[in-house]
């Protein structure tokens, strides 16, 4: 006992955080054991002495054997902890894993599991560690739940393992969580509430993340989303504004600031406040990823406020070869509709034909793919094959993919799939780590267990991701079917318009012959310090987003 | 999907709407940023007007020497090239040189310092070049028209004939092309031609004290010569 107590003292003085926790856990268990012994002694005193000498000898022999076993077990545990103290996590984990399965240590199973989890966490085997912590939590009625929950949520967060994280968060009490991680926890809880459709509760939880926290921008953004989903558009605007204002000292391309602006623009659009929507969309810097989406959404806002020339200016960028890999079927239809408004039927026909040329083959390829693809694992394999080629920088023409290229590229940007891929990636990293461990470790119980566990998780994660891909592909299939139908309507309107124009022409009141605004003075741009380049078919990267449509309305 | 349902609604109200709405362009939409949009695989230009990959190039050219004190060095020739890509090309350039004396040489002759009449001069050169075009751009001179340009660097090796004898020559050059259309352009080329040439001051051929009356190339000392050529030519892409 003295040995253990001195060891604990030593540990608490010299060990880093996980082992401090470890010593605390050990000391508390020692106190618990001494209390139990005292009680047992008292009980024994009260019992009458009825047994014979022979049986008492047998009893004392058994007790001796028990004591020896116990001492050996304690020595083994102390040895394992000593290895942990020396940073020999591999050896310690092998020992602790064996101990966790031994009947000799059944009283200390949860303690051992927790310490084993800490060892694995130190070895960056987060998935395997998370399972140890989750077992401690699931077992309940032990003194390691609180610490295990904390570690479990951290490991799950690192892994991006939503299932594990949800489980941990469903058990955790914020007040019992270390102060340093509380904001992160609130953010994560809010995120999960939002995902499960509890919008008001999510907004309330996220509201508790203080402005001083590093999680404040993310929390405010999600809060804005939660309010939007719940239909509280004014509150959503306030949340997004708070986010944008809190990032006023950051560079204008700050991703949180940009997300806030995009949120403001979208909420304004939803409120049918076109002017403000246009204002916020325009504030999104061109050298940021969301700018592309913003440009398209801006076109809708401009369309709703009848700024047709501006819409067509945007589409000149959006339908340039720079966007030939983007999935933008709706924008082509919208462009066609604008041409219909301004009676530019020839341009409308070109646009609708472009839609046919690009999206009809995509639609039929997708239909064909979905007809035979039912297995989520194989769907994920196809998608992953695409992603590997795409990430390696292969040009579009050389990428071999069963899923249509622009569809796969679009699906890859979906949040749920990105999250799943991040988790799969983390599992792959963990798998690599396991394969790089010493042969002894890999052959040991914990080695085999980790390998099996990670591979099973990987298989399941891929299945889940495959299902997500499938859901997105089905959504796109439905979307393309609807848009194709609308393209048909638009074509009908176009033919009708052409017919009307012909009738007017026969009656001597045809369309205007000039389709370009000749009165638009090009000097205007130059005088205002801009360069003016007439468009001659070439698209330059620095011109994207700066095209101005000079066509006119042909209707009389 | 962003306001998809609106499409149909718009469609059925389109004709009357078109009659009433005015096409407007807001001046406040002028560019306020000079940064580039973010793409996974950014390329500076798409749909190039002048596309050179796998095209042959013919270039008749004319030029003169910038740094020869004794001869004008007017030259004319032809280059035939092949573009391996938009950036890389190879070409073969041949040029003949005139032996017209410069004003300075004439002045020396008048003062009987030197007689350049029978001195060996550069006759022709034939060079095999590699050409690298790192820059493709455009300029607008009249605001209404745009001209594509590119800037190239080249390096070559070949032969040079001086006074009936051939020797090794190397060249380094820098130039610019101005394209009037997809296939026709103007080429301006500044080239440094390097070779082992005669030192015209190593033979005294002026007045009565002449070293040799009719000097050949062997009578001269040889020295490293850097001849700067400015060449202008038409470029035809086939």
Image (cartoon, coloured by chain):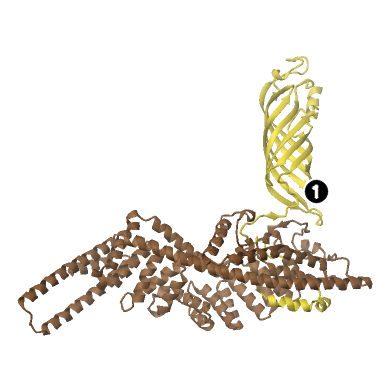
Chain colours: A brown, B yellow
For residue A175, above or below residue B209: below
Quadrant into which the N terminus of chain A falls: bottom left
For residue B126, above or below residue A20: above
Percent across and percent down for residue B181 are: 80, 49
Please identify the quarter of the rendering in which residue A145 is found: bottom left
Residue drawn at x 11%, y 74% is A59
For residue A460, above or below residue B42: below
Percent across and percent down for residue A325 are: 65, 61
The residue tagged 1 is B180
Indicate left or right for B33 with A37 as reference.
right
Residue drawn at x 37%, y 56% is A437
Indicate left or right for A93 with A370 as reference.
left
Q: In this orientation, which residue lies closer to the viewer: A277 or B188?
A: A277
Please identify the quarter of the rendering in which residue A295 is found: bottom right
Please identify the quarter of the rendering in which residue A541 is found: bottom right
Percent across and percent down for residue A478 are: 65, 72
């Amino acid at each position: 006992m003295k040995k253990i107590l001195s060891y604990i003292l030593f540990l608490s003085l010299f060990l880093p955080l996980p082992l401090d926790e470890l010593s605390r856990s050990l000391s508390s268990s020692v106190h618990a054991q001494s209390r139990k012994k005292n009680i047992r002694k008292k009980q024994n005193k009260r019992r009458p002495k009825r047994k014979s000498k022979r049986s008492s000898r047998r009893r004392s022999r058994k007790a001796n054997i028990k004591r020896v076993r116990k001492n050996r077990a304690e020595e083994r545990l102390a040895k394992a902890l000593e290895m942990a103290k020396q940073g020999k996590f591999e050896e310690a984990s092998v020992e602790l894993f064996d101990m966790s399965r031994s009947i000799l240590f059944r009283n200390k199973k949860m303690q051992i599991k927790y310490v084993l989890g800490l060892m694995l966490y130190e070895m960056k085997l987060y998935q395997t560690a998370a399972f140890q912590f989750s077992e401690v939590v699931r077992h309940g009625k032990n003194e390691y739940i609180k610490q295990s929950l904390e570690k479990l949520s951290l490991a799950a967060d690192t892994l991006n393992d939503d299932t594990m994280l949800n489980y941990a968060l469903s058990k955790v009490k914020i007040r019992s969580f270390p102060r340093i991680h509380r904001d992160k926890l609130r953010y994560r809880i809010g995120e999960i509430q939002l995902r499960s459709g509890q919008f008001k509760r999510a907004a309330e939880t996220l509201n508790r993340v203080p402005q001083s926290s590093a999680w404040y921008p993310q929390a405010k953004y999600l809060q804005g989303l939660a309010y939007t989903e719940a239909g509280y558009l004014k509150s959503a605007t306030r949340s997004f504004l708070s986010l944008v204002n809190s990032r006023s000292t950051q560079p204008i391309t700050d991703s949180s600031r940009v997300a806030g602006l995009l949120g403001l623009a979208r909420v304004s659009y939803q409120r049918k406040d076109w002017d403000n929507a246009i204002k916020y969309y325009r504030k999104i810097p061109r050298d940021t990823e969301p700018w592309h989406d913003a440009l398209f959404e801006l076109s809708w806002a401009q369309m709703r406020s009848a700024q047709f020339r501006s819409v067509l200016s945007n589409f000149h960028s959006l339908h340039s070869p720079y966007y030939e890999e983007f999935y933008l079927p709706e924008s082509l239809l919208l462009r066609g509709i604008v041409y219909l408004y301004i009676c530019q039927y020839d341009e409308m026909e070109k646009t609708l034909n472009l839609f046919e040329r690009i999206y009809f083959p995509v639609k039929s390829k997708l239909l064909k793919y979905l007809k035979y693809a039912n297995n989520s694992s194989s769907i994920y394999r196809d998608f992953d094959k695409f992603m590997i080629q795409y990430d390696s920088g292969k040009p579009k023409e050389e990428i071999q993919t069963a899923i249509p290229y622009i569809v796969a590229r679009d699906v890859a940007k979906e949040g749920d799939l990105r999250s799943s891929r991040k988790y799969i990636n983390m599992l792959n990293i963990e798998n690599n780590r396991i394969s790089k461990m010493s042969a002894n470790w890999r052959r040991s119980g914990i080695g085999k267990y980790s390998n099996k566990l990670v591979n099973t998780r990987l298989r399941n994660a891929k299945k889940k991701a495959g299902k997500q891909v499938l859901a997105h592909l089905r959504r796109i299939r439905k979307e393309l079917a609807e848009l194709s139908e609308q393209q048909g309507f638009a074509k009908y309107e176009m033919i009708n318009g052409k017919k009307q124009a012909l009738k007017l022409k026969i009656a001597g009141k045809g369309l205007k012959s000039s389709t370009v605004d000749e009165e638009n003075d090009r000097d205007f741009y130059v005088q205002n310090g801009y360069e003016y380049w007439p468009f001659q078919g070439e698209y330059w990267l620095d011109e994207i987003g700066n095209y101005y449509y000079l066509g006119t309305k042909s209707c009389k | 999907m962003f306001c998809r349902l609106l499409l149909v609604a718009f469609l059925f109200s389109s004709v009357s709407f078109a009659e009433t709405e005015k096409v407007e362009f807001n001046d406040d939409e002028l560019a306020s940023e000079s940064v580039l949009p973010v793409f996974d695989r950014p390329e500076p230009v798409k749909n190039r007007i002048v596309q050179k990959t796998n095209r042959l190039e013919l270039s008749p050219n004319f030029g003169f020497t910038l740094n020869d004190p004794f001869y004008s060095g007017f030259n004319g020739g032809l280059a035939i090239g092949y573009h391996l890509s938009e950036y890389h090309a190879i070409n073969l350039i041949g040029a003949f040189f005139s032996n017209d004396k410069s004003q300075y040489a004439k002045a020396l002759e008048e003062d009987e310092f030197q007689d350049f009449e029978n001195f060996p001069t550069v006759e022709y050169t034939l060079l095999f070049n590699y050409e690298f075009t790192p820059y493709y751009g455009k300029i607008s001179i009249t605001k209404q028209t745009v001209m594509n340009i590119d800037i190239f660097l080249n390096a070559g090796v070949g032969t040079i004939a001086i006074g009936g004898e051939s020797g090794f020559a190397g060249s380094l050059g820098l130039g610019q092309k101005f394209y009037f259309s997809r296939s026709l352009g103007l080429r301006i080329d500044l080239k440094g031609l390097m070779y082992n040439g005669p030192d015209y001051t190593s033979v005294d051929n002026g007045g009565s004290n002449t070293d040799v009356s009719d000097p050949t190339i062997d009578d001269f000392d040889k020295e490293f010569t850097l001849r700067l050529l400015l060449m202008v030519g038409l470029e035809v892409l086939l």
